Each structure stands twice: as C-alpha cells, then as structure tokens.
Image (spheres, rainbow, N blue to C red):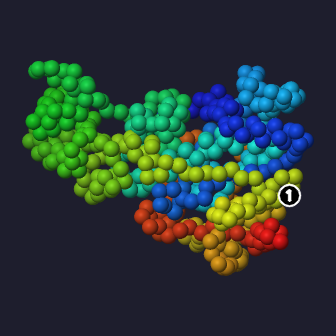
Amino acid sequence: MAAEQDPEALAAARPLLTDLYQATMALGYWHAGRAREQAEFELFFRGCPFGGAFALAAGLRDCVRFLRAFRLQDADVQFLASVLPPDTDPAFFEHLRALDCSDVTVRALPEGSLAFPGVPLLQVCGPLLVVQLLETPLLCLVSYASLIATNASRLRLIAGPKKRLLEMGLRRAQGPDGGLTASTYSYLGGFDGSSNVLAGQLRGVPLAGTLAHSFITSFLGTEVPPDPGLLDTYSVQRSGLPNFLAVALALGELGYRAVGVRLDSGDLLQQAQEIRRVFRSISAQFQMPWLESVSIAVSNNIDEEELTRLAQEGSEVNVIGIGTNVVTCPRQPSLGCVYKLVSVGGQPRMKLTEDPEKQTLPGSKAAFRLLGADGSPLLDLLQLAEEAPPRAGQELRVWPRGAQGACRVRPAHVEPLLRLWVQQGQLCEPLPSLAESRAFAQLSLSRLSPEHKRLQQPAPYRVALSDKLQALVARLRAGESS
C-alpha cells in the first residue's frame, strides 16, 4: 500500500470554497470590532442516516489539512473585493490577507469513531471572524466523508467479515473530488480496496480491478484473450466459462494459477453457484485442486438487498464490487451536518426555535461514552466543560434527549470522546493512518450492541445531558420566554 503524501501539500479545500454569506458576516464582525472575540462552534448531525442508529465520524484528516494550509491569497482577496459592496473599507481586505488558523483550536472524535446525533464531531474555537469563515468548508469536508464511511460500514455489516468488498464507483461519482472522497472513506468504512488509482496514489487506499467487456470484444474469431476472466460478455456457459477453463488449464500445466472470474449481469448468485460446481468438477477431473477455489467476483448495481443475497451462506461469491450504491448514497444523499455557535466571549449561546429538533445545546462542552461491564456502549453523555468527568462505578443522574425526565446510570467504564488535535494552529499528535482509522472503525462497530447495529428498525442509541447542562438549557429557555 502506498503511503499518504504530505498533508499540507494535499489540502482538500481552499478558503474560498465557501458561501458568500460567510464573507458578509466576516465583514459585519470586523465593522463591529468583534473579529478577534473568542468563539466556539460545534459541528454535529441531528439524525442518523439510512434509518440506522449510528454513524461513523470521518473527514478529520481533510479538515486538519485544510486548517494547516488556510491562507487567503492575493487573488482570493481581490475576488472578494469584487463581490462585496464597493464602499467596503480597504482595511478589511488587509485584515483578510493576514488571516490564518494559528489561533484556532480543534477537538474532534477520532476518525472511525461511532457518532450519534447531537454529539460534536468537531469543536472549533478561535477568533470569531476566522471560525465563522471555517463553517462551510468544514461542513463540506466532514458531512460527505462521514456519510460515505457510514454507508460503507453498513455494506460491510451485511457482507460479513469474509467477503471482499471493492469500491468501483469513480465513473458514477459526483465529480472528481466526490470520487476521491468516496474511495478514501469507503475504505475507512470497511471496504477492502478501490479501483480509483488516484486514491491509491494520494491516500494509500489499496487498489484492485478486473477488466472491461471491451477487452474481451477486442479479440475476434478464434483469438482467445490472454485472461478471459469476464465471463458474461457473450454467454457464460457457451463462451465465457469454456474459454476461461481452456486458458486456466493450459496455464496450470505451465505452473501458473488463474486469479479469478467476474460476472456483472444476470442472476449473480445462481451463476456463481453454477460456476463453482463446474470448477469443482473440472478440478477433480484434471487433478488441479487450486481450481476449485478460484475467486468469483461479481458486480452490477449491487445494493443492500442484493448484497444480502450474495452474502448468504453458500453463495460461492468471494469478491463483490459496488459502485453507484456506495458513492452516491441513494438511500440518503446527505448527512445534514450543522455548525452552530455555542459560546462567544466566554458566554453560552443557544439557538431557540419553534422546532425542538433545531434547538442547540449551549456552552463549551465535554463528551463521554458510558460503557457497560462487557464494554458495549450504554449512552453518550454531554456535559459542561467545567464539570468533573464522570467516573467508572459512579451512579449518575442524566437527562436523555427526547425523554420526559431524568434517569440513573452506573457505567462500568468511561471513555472521553473528544480529543485535542489542533491547538493554536499546531497539530498536537500525529493523525492515524487511513488503515489505522479503518481498523478502529471496525473495532468500534464490533463493540456496539446488536440492537443498535441492526440496519432495519434498530433501537435508538441514547445521548444524554448532565444535570448542569440540562439546568443551563432550562435557564436559557426560561429567559427567552420571559
């Protein structure tokens, strides 16, 4: 596997990958003399995707790359000057030229972490003007990456640990950037590799591929392709399989072994079972035991339902290529992450609205995962940063979100969730490799209770507030209504 390249040289976004109103608000903060006022934002999602009960956090490595490289170039500032009001004070643009993220601090869930509604994926602190400008790029970098990783993890759960899953969706992806993101984070979510060569070069994703029908059809008459592994270009039984066996047996006599065959049309399950029966028969007839276990790869618009068929016991399929249904996330095309102000000038801020689901949680917060004796997560606890961390064995009164009242819980283990990754613009610890994050994601999923891991009608996972955070929310609500 290729190593990932230098992070600063691979910034996944540029400062002007943003919405115009971010620049307008920045101008407003500057005019009000509040550009350097300390503020904190939280990036989170409100509901789990795909009807499930969990998500996987992803995109942190791209956010760190972006923050470390963040600097408006002269051309960027000149363009902003052309779209903002013509009477804008030139001193504002001089302020923009000097901006970087040297005063920004980021806490975040490690990539591959289980994530749940309302629990911050990122906490971003720093000068108000700067951290406001970060909103759109960070949302863009985290939302799709986390959606892809979660989608891939669902497909891995269906496939089980033994099937090899390949992402083959570059030609169906939403543009080059979407294709690279999908290849990267489908691997993090549990796929074994990708056909995307650029993802291999830039991100270290393992590469794999087969061949196209055009390779088979380019040979005419009695010519036989050197590796006729794509069996269904014409007919599996009359053409593809006999040609493959002829070549495989001839090469076998010379000491070479065929790698595998691929199907991408028709009833994939039935054909794979028939092909395996032929392999076993020919293997015994010609005393070539390796032929019996030649890999069978399949593709053809495979979704969760078809994957369930292909993953069943006795399917005889070894490798499953998925394109459209992993990279486009057709069951839910957006995770719907938001980036909300929770503190400014050291004072908590809260969005109050008629829609309870859109109300935010105020103040600088810490987050903990409370675990049972078997290590499975019980609930995630949000509390004010000033509070003492919960302790294992300590009974706590907590307020589950969406419930009518408090409940008590006694965790056997407690895990802090948010780690300090960037402080005053400096990376605090090396980011895990993509392969390490992938392994962590699989470990995290293995600890989740089956009732929460079910893909259809799962039990909701609880996120709760501490007494002090609940009291702050109640106080701010009362102050707004009085």
Q: What SS does tag 1 mark?
A: strand
Quarter the C terminus occupies: bottom right
Residue at image point 73% right, 63% down: 352
Under mark 1, the amino acid is Gln
Relative to 5, is 179 on the left or the right? left
Q: Position of residue 420 (x, y in %)?
A: 73, 49
Identified at 30% across, 46% down, the residue is 318
The one nearer the camera, 59 or 24, is 24
Above or below, 93 against 369 in this view is above
- Give whichever of 132, 202 is nearer the camera: 132
The mark tally for this picture is: 1
The spot of residue 446 in percent (x, y) is: 49, 60
User: Foreground residue, 73 or 1?
Assistant: 73
372 with respect to 91 (left or right) = left
Residue 87 relative to residue 288: left or right: right
Q: Quadrant of residue 209?
A: top left
Relative to residue 28, is residue 370 depicted above or below? below
Crowd tier of the residue under label 1, counting other residues whose Cα lies within 10 Å: few below 14, some 14–19, many 20 or above: few
Question: Can residue 166 be seen in the rendering of this structure?
Answer: no
178 sits to left or right of 171? right
Looking at the image, residue 406 lies above or below residue 275: below
Q: Nearer the viewer, residue 342 or 366?
A: 342
Relative to 171, say whether 325 is above or below.
Answer: below
Residue 381: where, in percent of width, then height?
68, 66
The residue carrying mark 1 is 347
Q: Residue furthest right?
A: 33
The percent position of residue 220, horizontal first and vertical second, equals 15, 20
What residue is drawn where x is 47% and y is 60%? Answer: 51
